[in-house]
Amino acid sequence: MEYVSRVPGPPLDGLIDDVYFLEGTPPYARLTLPPAPSALLIINLSAPFQIRAGSERETAGYADGCVVTMPTRAWEFGYPQGSRSVGVHFKPWGLAPFLRIPAAELRDRPVTVEQVWGRAVVAELQDRLATAGGPHAMLALLEEELRRRLGESAGLDLVRRTSSVIAATRGAVSINELSVAAGVSNTHLVQRFKELIGITPKRLARSHRFAATVFSINHSGPIDWSELAAGAGYFDQAHFGHEFREFTGLTPTRYVEVRRRFLREHPGNVLNSWPLPAD
């Protein structure tokens, strides 16, 4: 698959990790995506893709694309053959200025881009992207649309500053400490997080700790799970295993087996750092 990405310029760089173009045949028809400390927007330019979110048993099709606030559970993504799309990886708080509803209402419930921006806007953007002269021109168009649709969100600076501390400590910070440093009550901080990110500060801290732990695993050799759990700040190995199962649906050992399968069957694939084969 071809993957082209870049960090947008100001002011989008304070909200977005990267904008990207993706095209090609997926390594697997279905991929499981553990919850990451990130929100996502996809503009689809090919056949509809399928998503099964959270505890839902049925998949749903998305023709124009989707908007996903920070998930709390693993979700399943089904790529069409000949997939083609552009998208945005938002910082946890970064999607809020582009939404018209509180993020908590979309938690673990992906929606179409049309539901967020309207049919006319999405149809025009898809047409412009489809006729653009290559990935870089497409990303420039996407950034232009994002700048045009950038709005204001009350409390965003508070959530941004607090979230940045959580990220810098890989989730190893108490919510009481965050509230005191921010000069607000726990209740106020939680309310702002739910409105703008869709989850609580504690849940965001858990997500950052899990992501940091996953990326620290060396898949090429034996793994000392007790040492890994202690280094990541988990209370004990049982706590570590519980978090792994909640975030991935797999035990740590099974997770590594599936990750190694991906790396073995598709070495160097642009998608092999986070998603897992679902079949």
Image (tube, rainbow, N blue to C red):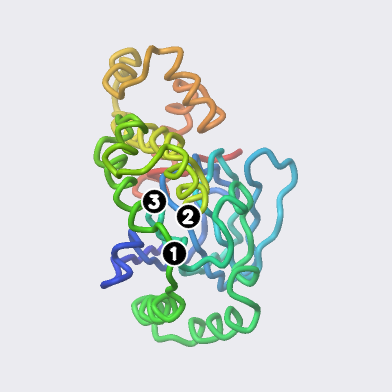
Q: Residue furthest right?
A: 58
Q: In this view, does 13 lie above or below 199?
A: below
Check if mark 1's residue and mark 2's residue have beta carbons within 8 Å.
Answer: yes
Q: Residues within 10 Å of mark 1 (few under 14, many from 20)?
A: some
Query: What is the secondary structure assignment of the residue under circle 2?
Result: helix
State the residue position of label 2: 196
Q: How far apart are marks 2 and 3 (CA)?
A: 33 Å
State the residue position of label 1: 153
In the image, 58: left or right of 157?
right
Q: How far apart are marks 1 and 2 (CA)?
A: 8 Å
**Is 7 in front, or is 72?**
72
Q: Where is residue 259 in the image (x, y as percent from the top left)?
A: 43, 34
Q: Which of marks 3 and 1 is nearer the N terminus?
A: 1
**Is 117 in front, or is 89?**
117
Residue type indicated by callout 2: Leu
Tell me the quarter of the picture where residue 147 sits: bottom left
Tell me the quarter of the picture where residue 55 sits: top right
Q: Where is residue 116 in the image (x, y as percent from the top left)?
A: 60, 69
Question: Which quadrant would the C terminus be assigned to in this image?
Answer: top right
In the image, 29: left or right of 144?
right
Q: Which of marks 2 and 3 is nearer the N terminus?
A: 2
**Is 262 in front, or is 276?**
276
Q: Position of residue 19 (x, y in %)?
A: 37, 66
The disc placed on residue 119 is: none
In the image, 76: left or right of 158?
right
Residue type indicated by callout 1: Ser
Which residue is rendered at x = 54% and y = 65% of the image? 83
Which residue is rendered at x = 43% and y = 62% of the image? 154
Query: What is the secondary structure assignment of the residue under circle 3?
Result: loop
State the residue position of label 3: 269
